Image (tube, grey):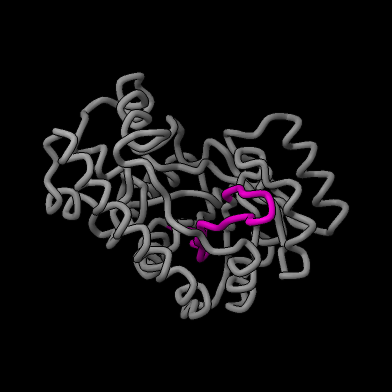
């Protein structure tokens, strides 16, 4: 089995439709896939339906934007195989999505005040079917350069980072609350790319909340990160997952299936 358990679609901050992602995954020989769109499960009915058409196993997934308040760091929590209703997850994430939308619309206004030509309605329309605007949607209205280009990165940092006119962030959910919500809905909670966000110290503290896994395979992980993940997984009996973290044109140049989950990962065998 070849499982990519970390892809994104246009239901959050991915550039591609569900079908386009699944087509690319199928071409790459992927047999199981999980869309982990940020803070939303609204795409699940379409993901399940289209995956079935292409003969790929779809696994319910989400990536919750959370925070380690002890260390003052962002942390992302992946959730897999939760109940379709996902009531606890939805209750937690609805507030995050509202905050994200308010921030994004404020950012659009600030950017316009700074002299850039950007239309709020056009940004909102371009984000659909996502009901939430992300920075990638704003950037799409500002520049045609690729995400990986120097021009894109310069404009992004000058607007959204440091003293940029649109710099700012939302108040995230506590990582423990994100884990508990996923577990409450019958799912497996996994710390996403701990090497990217330096989340390793937090992992033992999430065990009591019900943490069940750690993401090992990710393009931002070094061999040292792999070693740390393997050590923690063995010590605490956690499963290891992985995936491409595909965002299409809104992210790193990578394709679905380029990075996959470890072959012996429990979640794939279970499903």
Choose top left, top right, bottom left or bottom right for residue 176. Answer: bottom right
Q: In the image, what residue occupies the spot 74% across and 54% down?
A: 203
Placement of the C terminus among the 4 image quadrants = bottom right
**Residue 194, x across and y down, in percent:** 66, 44
What number of labels is visible? Answer: 0
- Relative depth, front residue between 109 and 12: 109
Q: In the image, what residue occupies the spot 55% across and 52% down?
A: 5
**Direction from residue 256 to residue 79 in the image, left or right:** right
Residue placed furthest toward the right = 235
Whether residue 63 appears in this view of the structure is no
- Relative depth, front residue between 267 and 245: 245
**Residue 139, x across and y down, in percent:** 26, 37
**Direction from residue 267 to residue 10 in the image, left or right:** left
Label the magenta part by its dominant secondary structure: strand
Choose top left, top right, bottom left or bottom right for residue 50. Answer: bottom left
Q: In the image, what residue occupies the spot 59% across and 63% down?
A: 174
Compared to residue 185, the image places residue 130 above or below, namely above
**Residue 227, x across and y down, in percent:** 79, 36
Q: In the image, what residue occupies the spot 34% across and 66% down?
A: 98
Region in magenta: 55-74
Whether residue 192 appears in this view of the structure is yes
- Please say whether residue 66 is one of the residues in the magenta stretch: yes
């Amino acid at each position: 089995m070849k499982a990519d358990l970390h892809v994104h679609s246009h239901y959050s901050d991915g550039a591609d439709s569900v079908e386009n992602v699944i087509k690319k995954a199928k071409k790459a020989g992927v047999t199981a896939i999980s869309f982990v769109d940020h803070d939303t499960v609204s795409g699940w009915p379409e993901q399940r339906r289209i995956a079935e058409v292409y003969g790929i196993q779809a696994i319910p997934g989400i990536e919750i934007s959370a925070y380690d308040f002890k260390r003052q760091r962002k942390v992302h929590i992946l959730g897999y195989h939760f109940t379709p209703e996902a009531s606890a997850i939805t209750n937690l994430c609805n507030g995050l999505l509202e905050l994200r939308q308010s921030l994004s619309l404020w950012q659009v206004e600030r950017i316009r005040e700074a002299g850039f030509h950007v239309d709020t309605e056009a940004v909102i329309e371009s984000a659909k079917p996502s009901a939430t605007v992300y920075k990638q949607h704003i950037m799409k209205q500002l520049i045609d350069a690729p995400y990986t280009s120097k021009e894109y990165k310069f404009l992004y940092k000058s607007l959204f980072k440091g003293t940029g006119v649109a710099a700012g962030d939302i108040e995230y959910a506590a990582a423990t609350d994100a884990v508990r919500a996923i577990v409450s809905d019958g799912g497996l909670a996994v710390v996403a790319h701990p090497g990217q966000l330096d989340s390793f110290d937090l992992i033992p503290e999430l065990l009591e909340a019900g943490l069940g896994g750690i993401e090992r395979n990710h393009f931002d992980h070094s061999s040292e990160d792999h070693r740390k993940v393997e050590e923690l997984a063995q010590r605490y009996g956690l499963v290891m997952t992985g995936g491409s973290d595909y965002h299409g044109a809104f992210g790193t140049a990578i394709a679905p299936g380029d990075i996959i989950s470890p072959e012996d990962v429990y979640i794939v065998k279970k499903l």
